[in-house]
Amino acid sequence: MLSFWEQKELIHYDYIVVGSGITGLSTACVIKERKPNAHILVLERGLLPTGASTKNAGFACIGSLSEKVYDLALMGEEKLLQLIENRWIGLELLRKRLGDTAIDFQNNGGYELILSHESNLHLEQLSSMNDRLRQIFKQDVFKEDKSKIGTFGFNANKLQSMVVNSLEGQINTGKMMNALHQYASSLGIKIITGADVSVIEENDNYVLVHANSSYNNIAFKASKVAICTNAFTRKLFPHLEINPGRGQVLVTSPISDLKVKGIFSFDEGFYYFRNFENRIIFGGGRNLDFEKEATTSFETNEKIIAQLQQYLSEMIIPNYSYTIEQTWTGIMAFGPNKLPLLQSMSDRIAMGVRLNGMGVALGSKIAEDLADILLSDD
Ligand SMILES: Cc1cc2nc3c(=O)[nH]c(=O)nc-3n(C[C@H](O)[C@H](O)[C@H](O)COP(=O)(O)OP(=O)(O)OC[C@H]3O[C@@H](n4cnc5c(N)ncnc54)[C@H](O)[C@@H]3O)c2cc1C
């Protein structure tokens, strides 16, 4: 039972945000930046954010050439360009809000590996894709450069070419989420962890957000609610088209004289690796086992980890000695196309979810758009 004090001071808010990943925390920050007197509560079910935002690879990217060619066929030019522009705007917002030092942003470039057995269909579309992207970036984004294969120490027998994107960079995901949390707290946003939201009830005057922990079940009250629960949203709204997709990741031990520097991907972005200091962080392979990876459970998939290890030893760092220090997983959200789900559910509830594998870039932009929806009639 709640005390008089709790009822009076700790339950009522102007805005409640459900989920403390990059989208949820950024949404809370945008609302507070625009309405400094608003009382805002973020409810997070985990002790730490427990989805994708603290578990990703930290690519500050707009996506590889082959990914763009695939997306063009999937969604057409207009939506493709809008999505790419939103990723770019999102990255700029993130960097501006937190600062490059705080998130350890490094502009080391992005590279796509074209494997020796792959067709060069994507390469044939490099120039037309550059023409399309010039509308946004006013310059050529993709450039083929075979010479880079040797620069990074890859096994040249496994690769036919590389495509360079000098706009892309990398961040330290842990530092970014720490900085975002600290920034939100410094604005006066209240964040409660271990609060699993089970039901959202709306009436004419407010929204009740029921949150459970092992100690309490509390119904918090707000004028408006933002849903930022990404892959876990169907627990609250089962009818929505949101499918979970697990990502497997590994990190190597420190490697002396490592030449790999930057963010790299291959196989239409299904595999991605980067250096973190003198280690390699390598993830992906969902396409090896789509069915098993369509889950919200955080288990390791040994088949995928074995494939990642094989690529490492045979193609990426063939001549180095290292061990695999750790593996982990994170959960992404996918839908029928690659577009996020940004919509109002009623006058008082709106959501920004389904960020695919792009949320480091997209999260801050979705937060702006979600705040626009929630604040539109205030
Ligand atoms: C392995 C991996 C690698 C990736 N690499 C990149 C990359 O390099 N670059 C890039 O741009 N993107 C990448 N992504 C994607 C990116 O991490 C996500 O798109 C982004 O983090 C999504 O942020 P979010 O805040 O919307 O969702 P999440 O980070 O999943 O946050 C949702 C939060 O809601 C909480 N929650 C859920 N349900 C409830 C509930 N009922 N009550 C309370 N809280 C709840 C969850 O615990 C979670 O903390 C990667 C993802 C993964 C998994």
Image (cartoon, rainbow, N blue to C red):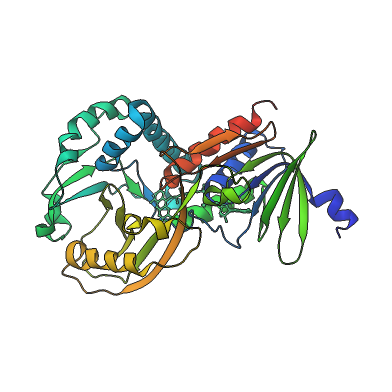
Q: Residue at 63% x, 51% y: name it.
A: 185
The residue closer to the viewer here, 23 or 284, is: 284
* Snapshot quadrant of residue 272: bottom left
The residue closer to the viewer here, 254 or 134, is: 134
The reply, left or right, for residue 334 in relation to residue 180 is left
**Taking the image as drawn, is residue 102 in sight?**
no
The reply, left or right, for residue 205 in relation to residue 329 is right
Quadrant containing the N terminus in the rendered view: bottom right
Residue 125, percent across and down?
19, 34
The reply, left or right, for residue 17 in relation to residue 177 is right
Residue 91, percent across and down?
42, 41
Please state the total of marks drawn on the protein image: 0
Residue 196, percent across and down?
66, 57
**Taking the image as drawn, is residue 372 in sight?**
yes
Q: Residue at 26% x, 70% y: name it.
A: 255
Say if 121 sits above or below 312 in the image.
above
The residue closer to the viewer here, 314 or 4, is: 314
The residue closer to the viewer here, 244 or 171, is: 244
Quadrant containing the C terminus in the rendered view: top right
Residue 134, percent across and down?
27, 27
* Snapshot quadrant of residue 260: bottom left
Q: Residue at 76% x, 49% y: name it.
A: 220
Say if 10 sits above or below 367 in the image.
below
Q: Residue at 46% x, 59% y: name it.
A: 330
